[in-house]
Amino acid sequence: MKKDIDNKLQSKNIKPTAMRQLVLQVLTEQNTAINLHDLELKFDRADKVTLYRTLRTFEENQLIHRIDDGTGAVKYALCQEKCNCHPEDLHVHFLCTKCNQTYCLNDIPVPTINLPNSFSLESVNMVVKGVCSNCKL
Amino acid sequence: MKKDIDNKLQSKNIKPTAMRQLVLQVLTEQNTAINLHDLELKFDRADKVTLYRTLRTFEENQLIHRIDDGTGAVKYALCQEKCNCHPEDLHVHFLCTKCNQTYCLNDIPVPTINLPNSFSLESVNMVVKGVCSNCKL
DNA sequence: AAAGTTCATGCAACCGGATTGCAAACTTAG
DNA sequence: CTAAGTTTGCAATCCGGTTGCATGAACTTT
């Protein structure tokens, strides 16, 4: 729904340009995280830098979050409804070593860690690697 | 101790060349993980590619492990005595956002995750970001 | 509606870490 | 000593990320 897309952008204070609508559309249809390169392939003709900046804008406005899964290229996925990207909002990510897809395990919060004395915590990145259900078939 | 260094290399089936001795020496004296660039700075005159390949050899022979802490450059640290780099051997890493140092929290094993059905686990990368005790002072 | 301001887009170019190819130097076995 | 294998050093490349700059679209002010 076009309206939904626009609303979502508006609600995050992002001006709904054509490009942004399209990118959000793609991200919405996606059930795994996507990197810049693969996002580019989803379009016939789109400038990588524009997509790059679109993703950055989305990230800055907490519409999406970045995932560093160790594959070399940063991936992005939509944030959950009420996510503020604070430690308590963070979930575990899963990278399939066969298909290279990265899943948001939204139901699995990042476990609490008891840090050594006088280390303070800001955020956590937890990536589990293995084989996903699709590739196990 | 020169002998210790050599023994350690031998025990991992790594031929103890001069370069490798020196690199292992540096890694041993280090209490935080180090990346290629910083390793290079530890030497007056050393080729980056040689260091790169030395690190790779060390990693392949499980003398050191790689840490992807999201800073853009891969860091390395010595493995524990009996580490096989299997999931049960893995520990949490801590990246200080002030000094950019990365610590191996060897005492903190990576928590067990209950993956969704039919996802299988191979390894886990868990990096906690925050401020270390040194920088809190 | 014209002029001015702000923001988004597209293109070219650059940067920095990782990696490869290749030849010279070194090591080891025969 | 020589041949085979390994390590080292240098140059060059690759690739994702990022910046600069000029054009263009949208929105404001008069």
Image: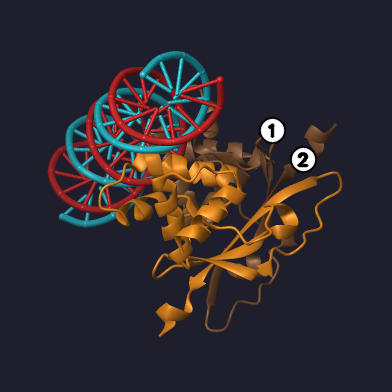
Chain colours: A brown, B orange, C red, D cyan
Callout 1 amino acid: Cys
**What distance separates the C-alpha of mark 1 from that of mark 2?**
8 Å
Residue A137: x, y in percent?
A: 85, 31
Would residue B126 be seen by someone viewing this image from the given angle? yes
Give the class, few, some or many, for how many residues have Cα within 10 Å of label 1's Cα (few <14, many ≥20).
few
Q: Residue at x 77, y 48 (%)?
A: B121
Would residue A63 be seen by someone viewing this image from the given angle? no
Considering only order in the chain, which callout, 2 or 1, is on the residue closer to the N terminus? 1
- The residue to which callout 2 is attached is A132
Tell whether B99 sits left or right of A103.
left
Q: Name the chain letter of the residue that bears numbered label 2.
A: A
Which of the pair A15/C13 is nearer the observer?
A: C13
| Relative vertical location of residue D5 with respect to residue B23 in this rendering, above or below | above
Callout 2 amino acid: Cys
Does the CB distance between marks 1 and 2 fall below 8 Å? Answer: yes
Which quadrant, please, contains the N terminus of chain A? top right
Tell me the SS state at disc 2: loop
- The residue to which callout 1 is attached is A99
Q: Quadrant of residue B67?
A: bottom right
Residue A38: x, y in percent?
A: 55, 32
Residue A5: x, y in percent?
A: 59, 44
